[in-house]
Image (cartoon, helix red, strand yellow):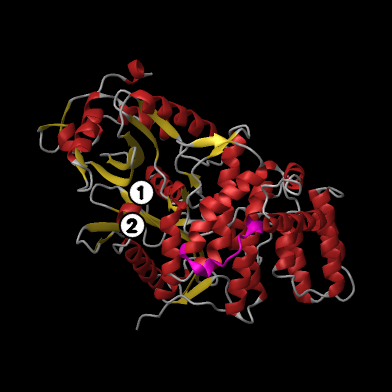
Amino acid sequence: FRRWLGPVARLAVDPESGQEYGWADVVAFDDEVEDDERERLLDAFGQTPLLQETLFLLFDGASVRLSDIPPGGIWVSRRWREPWRSVYRVTVHTRFRGHYDLAIKMDHDEGGDRTLEAADEEMWLLVAGDRDGHAVAARQGGRWPELGLWSEQFQGTRRANWQIARLHVRDALADAWPAICWGVGRVTFEVWDAMLRRHVPADLSPQNFAIPGEDYKTGSRLASAARRRPFRTLAGLLSDFERGFVAPVMAQYPEVGRETPWEAVLTGLLEVVGVPDGLTLLGTLVDDPEAAPTLVCAARAFVAKVEAHGLVPRQLRHAIDRYRAWATLAGDATVEARAKMVQELCRTYQLGELRQQYPEVRARLFRATVLKTAPDWVGRQLDGLIDELRTGAIPPEALTERVGLLRGAPGAEPELEYFLARLGYPHLEPDDDASLLGGEARGLGAELVVTLEDEAGRPYYVRPPVNPKELAALQRLYAGADILVSFQAHHRFMLAVDERGAVLGGMYYGLDQETRVCHLEKLVVAESRRGQGVGDGLMAELFKRLTSAGYHTVTTGFYRRGYFYRLGFEVEGRHAGLVKHLKTPS
């Protein structure tokens, strides 16, 4: 592999100035990186193929050499330091291929037992790194034991202790606590399952997990597998989880309460091992002396609930909670707004991907949201339908036929008919407007490039993408922020790029030309430029271009409410999610 990649170049020529430059001219360090660490990293870049190999392995065969990187094009900052290791974020800007982020771990104790421990840890991370397309640990790049260095995928998510403190400051921790316990618990069970259920992480503290800041994002990860212990019993694992993760948070943040949210944690267990296996495992808790009475009581109640009504996957629960929070604020929302809200939640939480394992998921969502107040006779029929789908009494494709029988029943009001139709036909749009499925390919002001400055005075440019590579770079930003996105033919895009053409952020949206409404799907900014006004600049420019094009309303999902409230968005019953009405220019 290394022979195929070729030798590491020591010098390159700057095509603009004609001057020679080397790796020392390319790499810049944050002030927190100490001198001896800088020397080790710079030697690794210049003397080994660490950078080329890692980028090739982590970024689909990317080929990057010294000549592709301009002077000052690599920025190294330290993410955190532990007694035995430091972890660095390395951002590589290239002349023509965008930028890449990776992580480099540096062992402080080179050689000896630590080298063997690092190799062992790398093996376990490789095992746990990809679980049916769902990563629970960072993807591995390579290891250079002679240098005490190894590389892996950069994780944009923050450590759980940092996210918890942030949510506490925002008075949002109490609401988010069950979701946090579910995410961290699920990662713990996934790593245990990947280790053939023979070992578990020994460090279950908040510092050893990375979690997203919002429940609609993906990206809960185990930070380090350096310490492991043999698995004893499920009761022992759950007790260790309570002591290692839950208890320290409860002690520091009283608003989370005094009881472990076991239902959320045990939901994660059943999602990992499957419902039958999970219920069998939970049955072992009853006679295990290591299981606390509160855990046994919670497990019994959870098992009884699952046996009676089935497992409600956490993604679905998040979607239902999000809808109810919006509906409370929206008041007397229109049927179209409620249907659009359900449709958006299905996309955001990827509920369609759950239907193979949980064929009743769509019926559950409708029953708990837009059909919650349906007449009793409809509710009983829907509850029976959910049970039949869950138990396999009827195949998933029978949903349309069974809902059709309800639609034609006596006493079905127009609103009920409306929602039942959309339950039975998932691809039916809320307003039956075909223009939502297509549209012109170009964006607003496709020829317009606007120059703005961030809060540090650095210029950046707002414009639509000019080639597929820029769309790929935007998609990488979303992936780095652990936001699932699905670009479609009718979507429009707007980017923020720096002077070198590197994508700093962007958004994608859809335009309804008949109603003159813009629906903003998701906004993202590279982590290195967050908090510096780039996102605000993108939003302000979108508003201006929409106004000039005759659009008067912008809608978006029911997320990041604090940010969008600051931009003038609000909840309104005529629209799903959040809405902002643009001022008509005088």
Task: Pick out the residue farthest to the top.
Answer: 3
311 up-or-down from 574: above or below = above
Q: Residue 391 shows which numbered tag? A: none
Q: Who's the residue at 28% across and 57% down the image? A: 461
Amino acid of disc 1: Val
Q: Give the image location of residue 36, x and y in percent.
A: 19, 36
Task: Pick out the residue farthest to the right.
Answer: 410
Secondary structure type for disc 2: strand
Magenta highlight on residue 260 = yes
Q: Rounded to the nearest whole Å, what is the CA distance between mark 2 and mark 1? A: 9 Å
Please say if the residues under marks 2 and 1 sit with CB atoms less than 8 Å apart.
yes
Instruction: Residue under label 1, please give it.
Output: 466
Q: Quadrant of residue 341?
A: bottom right
Amino acid of disc 2: Arg
The magenta region covers: 252-264
* Residue 566 horizontal side relative to residue 378, left or right: left
Disc 2: CA contacts within 10 A as few (<14), some (14-19) or many (>=20): many
Instruction: Residue under label 2, please give it.
Output: 463
Residue 392 or residue 472, whichever sits in front: 392
Magenta highlight on residue 558 = no
